[in-house]
Image: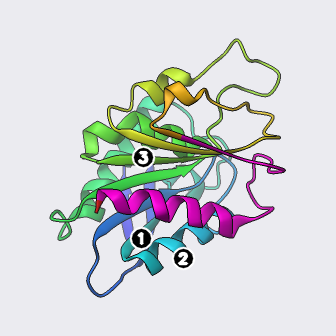
Amino acid sequence: MQVMTPRGPALVEFDEVADPRLLLVLTHGSAGGVEAPDLLAVRDAALAAGASVARVTQAFRVAGARAPGSPVKQDEAWEIVLREVRAGRSGLPLVQGGRSNGARVACRTARAVGAVAVVALAFPLHPPGRPERSRAEELRGAGVDVLVVNGDRDPFGIPDAADAAELVVLRGENHDLKRDPARVGEVVAGWIMRYA
């Protein structure tokens, strides 16, 4: 499905289950796509647990950009996409999430789109080597429960457990969370289904 936003079209890929218990909407990081190993593993585990899944390629990536630009404009486009994604599915609890920059978007827009929870994969707490530029306020400001899954070797830092409903730090994982993506999927699926 294509959704037009002020920044151009966004693309949505749906994977539906017969009798969904919730809707999980996922998106990518700044330079990545919805085929990232951790996003695919989360999709597979969520489908097996009874959630329908939508993966969103945001408009800036469809246009070929590697940087999302203004957070205000990115969030505006995300909210438009989510309205379309939820059309006909408004009775399902919505959990939204993403990896890296996508996790930030999910936190910033959670209340605006009516999400009941957020999944933040590889939340980029700060730019590498710049811990003074913390983004922890985005986690604290989500207004809903946030699950953070980070690797213990992530150069973007690891959020404090107090800033999320749950923090899972995976040993040996870097920012890409691709050493054991099935484990990422297992953690996320187990957590999101409490909101079904």
The answer to whether one can see residue 181 in this image is: yes
Residue beneath the point at 46% across and 80% down:
48
Residue 82 image offset from top left, x and y in percent: 31, 55
The quadrant of the image that shows the C terminus is bottom left
Q: Is residue 87 left or right of residue 60?
A: left
Query: Mark 3 highlights which residue?
Result: 118
189 in the magenta segment: yes
Residue 134 image offset from top left, x and y in percent: 63, 19
Asked whether disc 1 touches disc 3, contact meaning CB atoms under 8 Å apart, the reply is: no
**Which label belongs to residue 53?**
1
Q: Which residues are magenta?
A: 167-195
Residue 39 image offset from top left, x and y in percent: 60, 64
Q: Nearer the viewer, residue 138 or 62?
A: 138
Q: Nearer the viewer, mark 1 or mark 3?
A: 3
The tag earlier along the polypeptide, 1 or 2, is: 2
Q: Amino acid at mark 2?
A: Asp
Residue beneath the point at 68% across and 47% down:
66
Residue reaching furthest to the top: 132
Q: For label 2, count other residues whose C-alpha is less than 10 Å away and answer few (under 14), some (14-19) or many (20+).
A: some
Q: Is residue 147 left or right of residue 34?
A: left
> Residue 123 falls in which quadrant of the image?
top right
Query: Mark 2 highlights which residue?
Result: 44
Residue beneath the point at 51% across and 30% down:
70
